[in-house]
Amino acid sequence: MTLIRVFSDLDAISHEAASLFIKLAKESVKAQTRFVAALSGGSTPRRLYSLLGSLPYRDQVDWPRVHIFWVDERCVPKDHEESNFKVVFDRLLSKVPIPGTNIHRIKGEELSEHGARDYEAHLKEFFGLKDFPIFDLVLLGMGEDGHTASLFPGSKWLNDTKRLVIPVHLKNPNLDRVTLTLPVLNHARNILFLVTGHSKAKVLAEVMTVKSHRHPYPAARIHPIHGRLLWFIDPESSSKLRSDNWGMGRGEPHQSTA
Ligand code: 6PG
């Protein structure tokens, strides 16, 4: 099922996303005693992380039962301003009673190949599996070039069906990253995209129209196998969506405005 919701601005998106996080955490803890989420970097989710780390949201989550992973990481030390771990830690994890053992960061300080191998081994150990992990929630953003996580258009890994985690080398800016792969993302129970801004409107309209699993935009290849896909977007990013985009041809989407 795909659900698209348009909110008045980033603040409204962030409040709704915080409420959804709490709801999913409660449901998952009830059903399977823990809630496992993979979070993204970028600027868009920062307000959400701050809200979850403050009242009234903070006290509505059973933090000792929550496990936080990352969708991707930049290869920088964990106290670097560009670190996705730091973004989440400073705003959220340092403010809530989550045990250190429930924080599963990608080791950005290592070479990307090592960081990827290490994270893949950790995922297999944590989920105790040979197949793909199933996150209760994967939080994603989308770039103006259609990338999501650290999966960029043209990446040789886009068609890989076996790896859980891959190293990524970017030329501009010259930076290594580590990212979960499409199959891992698509196995999640819930995938939530947060997208704002006029600069993403064109790509968003295309991503919403596309039906191909081979589209050059990695964001267009996010199709949960069994789970739910949710888009929380603002009026600017949704400005180029056509009425048939709301149909998307995948499940039973809804449009709502808050
Ligand atoms: C990252 C991300 C990346 C991000 C998009 C959107 O670590 O940068 O995982 O995929 O979500 O680039 O970023 P913005 O929210 O800054 O637009």
Image (cartoon, grey):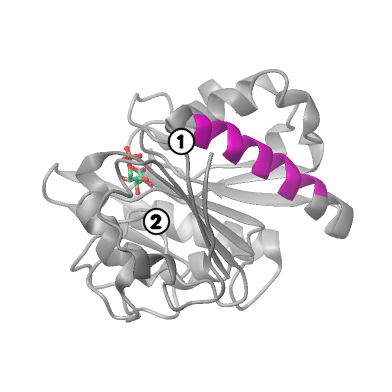
Would residue 126 be found to the left or right of residue 16 on screen? right
Tag 1: amino acid:
Pro
Relative to 86, residue 40 above or below = below
Q: Is residue 86 above or below residue 258?
A: above
Span shown in magenta? 12-26
Mark 1 vs ligand 1: CB below 8 Å: yes
The residue that mark 2 highlights is 179
Pinpoint residue 117: horizontal percent, then vertical percent. 45, 60
Image quarter in which the C terminus is found? top right
**Which type of secondary structure does the marked residue at label 2 adopt?**
strand
| Amino acid at circle 2 | Thr
Q: Is residue 73 above or below residue 167?
A: above
Q: Residue 146: tell me if it is visible.
A: no
Q: Quadrant of residue 125?
A: bottom right
Where residue 100 appears, as percent x and y from the top left, is 69, 33
The yes-or-no answer for disc 2 within 8 Å of ligand 1 is yes
Disc 2: CA contacts within 10 A as few (<14), some (14-19) or many (>=20): many
User: What type of secondary structure mainly makes up the magenta span?
Assistant: helix
Residue 227 in percent (x, y) is at 61, 69
Point out the tag, 1 or 2, that comes first from the N-terminus. Answer: 1
Residue, disc 1: 45
